[in-house]
Image (cartoon, grey):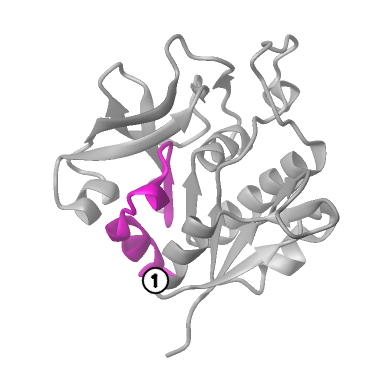
Amino acid sequence: MTRPLVAIPARFSAHASALRYRAEVAARALVEAVYRAGGEPWIMHPDAAEAEQRLARADALLLPGGGDLAPHRYGAAAVHDTVYDVDDAQDAFDLAAARYALAAGLPTLAICRGMQVVNVALGGTLRQHMDGDHRHLVQPVALAPDSALAAAAGVPKVDASCYHHQSVARLGTGLRPVAWAADGTVEALELPGTPLLAVQWHPEDAPDAWLFDAWLRRS
């Protein structure tokens, strides 16, 4: 079997066990979920200058969770004091990767920060800090019945493992909300007519094998 090549932008880390220097990492649970679903994980160095040429080799893109996007990326002048782990190089690469994938029709799974990146890449904005954040929380999420997400899940509601203090504010162009927490927070987005699945929760925590399987079937 030939596994589809799944590009996963690395996350910068100040340290990692057994390494003497700063590291570029990917969550093991995420990489294993991709591999179990039949993909070949490709951890990419975040260099925005060559994002398009390098991503042209990939069969799919996974935009993972991570720190917060710099608020200026979506036009915010003030920065909330809870914003953390902002990295300009990481933001530049993730946004370039999202824009390339959406334009090229590359099957994309965007998770947590990844969903926020997609929203910002399409001109949307973020709420910098929610009243009552969704960190360390497993909660029921209702799915839009006519969505690709609901078709993949086969049920109207899923239990989602959430870890986020930010959320979508103004929607990016063309994006459609397709899942909501009980408090009304948008927990998933789709871009009709494209192979994009974007979820605010962390399906690798469960793991939600159905979501990774459905996404990779599109690649």
Q: Residue 207: horizontal and vertical position, in percent?
A: 34, 54
Q: Is residue 73 left or right of residue 109?
A: right
Residue placed under numbered mark 1 in the picture: 36
Magenta residue span = 194-219
Q: Is residue 7 above or below residue 38?
A: above
Between residue 170 and residue 214, name the one nearer to us: 214
Amino acid bearing label 1: Arg
Q: Is residue 187 above or below residue 38?
A: above
Extreme-left residue of the structure: 155
Residue at 58% in and 23% down: 125
Extreme-bottom residue of the structure: 1
Q: Is residue 24 above or below residue 36?
A: above
Residue at 15% in and 40% down: 156
Q: Is residue 167 left or right of residue 85?
A: left
Between residue 198 and residue 33, name the one nearer to us: 33
Disc 1 residue crowd, few under 14, some 14–19, many 20+, Cα 10 Å: few
Element type at mark 1: helix
Q: In the rendered image, which quarter contains the N terminus?
A: bottom left
Q: Residue 111: horizontal and vertical position, in percent?
A: 48, 45
Taking the magenta stretch, the answer to whether it contains residue 41 is no
Q: Residue 5: horizontal and vertical position, in percent?
A: 56, 74
Residue at 31% in and 53% down: 208
- In the rendered picture of this protein, how many numbered marks are placed on residues? 1
Q: Residue 191: horizontal and vertical position, in percent?
A: 42, 44
Q: In the rendered image, which quarter contains the C terminus?
A: bottom left
